[in-house]
Each structure stands twice: as structure tokens, then as C-alpha cells.
Amino acid sequence: MNQFNLRVYGFILNEDQELLLSDEYRFDTFFTKLPGGGVEFGEGILDALSREFKEELNSEIISSELIFLNEFFQESVFHKNVQVTCFYYLVKCSNIDSFGKKDYTIPFNTNGEKQRWMKIQEIDEDQLSFKTDQLALKKLKKLLKI
């Protein structure tokens, strides 16, 4: 059956112009993406982003600005016949100093997720695992004139 999957992600930049990345292992695959995830039935896009930030980062969103939305067909990497539409926001949030205490080696092969900071100007788009993330990062860098 053909289905739709809505996803929402946040760009979080700290005062050192570092971007928070999420390294994850799921479906027997390691990948690097942005914090965020799936929109549940009955949720609005920003409600889902708030929930994901609470779950993944124990953080409250202070402000958000829509930066990118994929306006093209994108099939899910993990599920055949599922079309993915992703929304990307530039986010200010609470508890930012507690994020990204990298104490792990990548790639890892146990289910879970961990976050790390990386200088945004040092990130190549292909360091992100998914096409929509890569295009969203390219758009953010253009907006920030990086």
C-alpha cells in the first residue's frame, strides 16, 4: 500500500556556530541526521517538533522558523512505497548546554541515538545520510552566508 510519512527536523546552532547532529543506529543501519522525527497522526508539524525535542533532547522549543520543505518526491530509505515529506526549522531551544557531549565513536552498531556538535562551515552536505537533510543543510548555509 502507498503511504505518506511526514517528518520534522530542527537545526540547532550554538554560539560557536556549531550545528547539533544526531548519530543513530536503527534498522541495522548507522546514519547521521538532524534532531527530529516522525509526525504522529493527529499532530501538527510544530507539535511533533516539540514532542521530538522533549523526547530526544529533554528540551523545550523557544522559537522556530521554517527553513526548508522538500517539494519533490522522496521515497523512504527504510520502507518501500512510502513517500516522505520533511519540514526543517531553525530552532532556539532550552538546555542547549547539555547537548552533544560526544563520548562515543562513529559509526556504532547498537540501537539508539547520540548527539554531537560540529562546526557548520566544516560540515559537507554528504556527511548527512539522507538527501532531504543534505538539501536542507545547503539551504541553511546559503541563508547564513556560509
Image: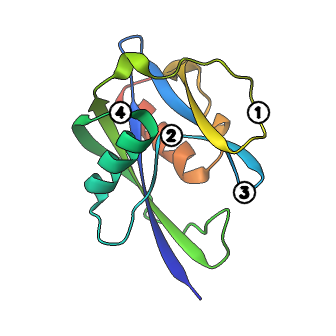
Sequence-wise, the earlier of marks 1 and 4 is 1
Question: Distance from label 3 to label 2 (Cα)?
Answer: 17 Å
> What numbered label is drawn on residue 143?
4
Q: Secondary structure at mark 2?
A: loop
| Residue closest to the far bottom | 1
Q: Nearer the viewer, mark 1 or mark 4?
A: 1
Q: Nearer the viewer, mark 4 or mark 2?
A: 2
Q: Nearer the viewer, mark 3 or mark 2?
A: 3
Q: Residue at x 41, y 10 (%)?
A: 16
Question: Distance from label 1 to label 4 (Cα)?
Answer: 30 Å
Observer-nearest of 113 and 138: 113
Is disc 3 surrounded by few (<14), some (14 to 19) or many (20+) residues within 10 Å?
few
Q: What residue did someone put label 2 on?
A: 34
Sequence-wise, the earlier of marks 4 and 3 is 3
| Amino acid on which disc 2 is placed | Leu
Q: What residue did someone put label 1 on?
A: 107
Please determine whether, in this image, residue 46 is positioned above or below residue 106: below
